[in-house]
Every structure is written in C-alpha cells, then in structure tokens.
Amino acid sequence: MKRTFLALASIISVSLTAMAADENKATADNTAKNQRDRSGQTKTSGDQSNSRGDLKTTQAIRKALMKDSSLSMTAKNVKIITAGGQVTLRGPVKSADEKSRIDQLAKGAAGNAKIDNQLEIKAAK
C-alpha cells in the first residue's frame, strides 16, 4: 500500500511540474513574419523558378550546404529560392559564422547568380 501511494504521489508531482513548466513557456507568435511574407516584398518558396538553370543552381547550393559538416541542421535547412538567376537565402541560422559560411558556399556553387542573403541569426535561449 505504501509503495502504491508513493508511486501515485510521484506521478502526480511530476505531472504538476510538467504542467507548470508548460505555462511558463512563451507562445510562438509568427504574425509579423506571416504578414511580411504575404506582402509580396520577400521571396518565399512559391517564388522558386522551374527553369532548368535556376533549379540546377538551387540544387548545387543545397548539395554544398549538406556536404559541409560544420553547419548545424538548422543552417542546412535554410530556404534557397532561385528565380531569374538571383538566389535568395532565407531562414534562421545559429551564428554569424554560419551565416557567412552559407553565403560563401552559395557564392561558390551559384556560378554567376547574384546572392541575396536574408538569413537571420537566431537568438540564443
């Protein structure tokens, strides 16, 4: 009986702690980013061109990012949007070094394409 009571008390304690932790978390608010993306002033994945050259450029940049073991998974998942020979890089990265490295890799893989680096350095928690 004591063991059952102790186990039940432990489970309740852990549950209450977890619920309290959830209440303290800030809720994500992407309203400003969503409005920015809908405005048409920034490139989104829907702006990716289907021309052979633009697709090859995007593919070459993505391959270069995936091969670089120094980049975090967050950095490897940035958006690469190529349209009309212009590449736009968007999304969060963990540091200024990653932002610079991605820019460098994109310039090396993109040939003559112009690079618009809109990567954002993610604030540390």
Image: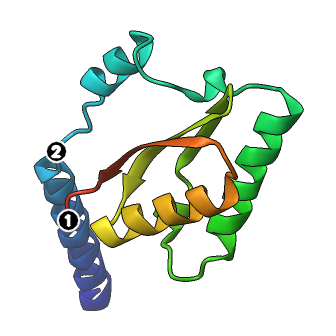
Q: Quadrant of residue 37?
A: top left
Mark 1 residue type: Ala
Could you say which is closer to the camera, residue 108 or residue 7? 108
**Residue farthest along the right direction in this orientation:** 52
Q: Eyeballing the image, is 69 above or below 33?
A: below
Q: Quadrant of residue 44?
A: top right
Q: Quadrant of residue 33?
A: top left
Q: Eyeballing the image, is 42 above or below 12?
A: above
Q: Which residue is mark 2?
A: 26
Q: Which residue is mark 1?
A: 124
Label 1 crowd bin: few (<14), some (14–19), many (20+), radius 10 Å: few
Q: How is the image coloured?
A: rainbow
Label 2 crowd bin: few (<14), some (14–19), many (20+), radius 10 Å: few
Could you say which is closer to the camera, residue 59 or residue 17? 59
Mark 2 residue type: Ala
Q: Residue at x 52, y 51 (%)?
A: 78
Q: Where is residue 21 drawn, in percent x and y?
A: 17, 59
Q: Eyeballing the image, is 27 above or below 84?
A: below
Compared across the picture, whether 62 is left or right of 88 comes to right
Could you say which is closer to the camera, residue 16 or residue 125? 125
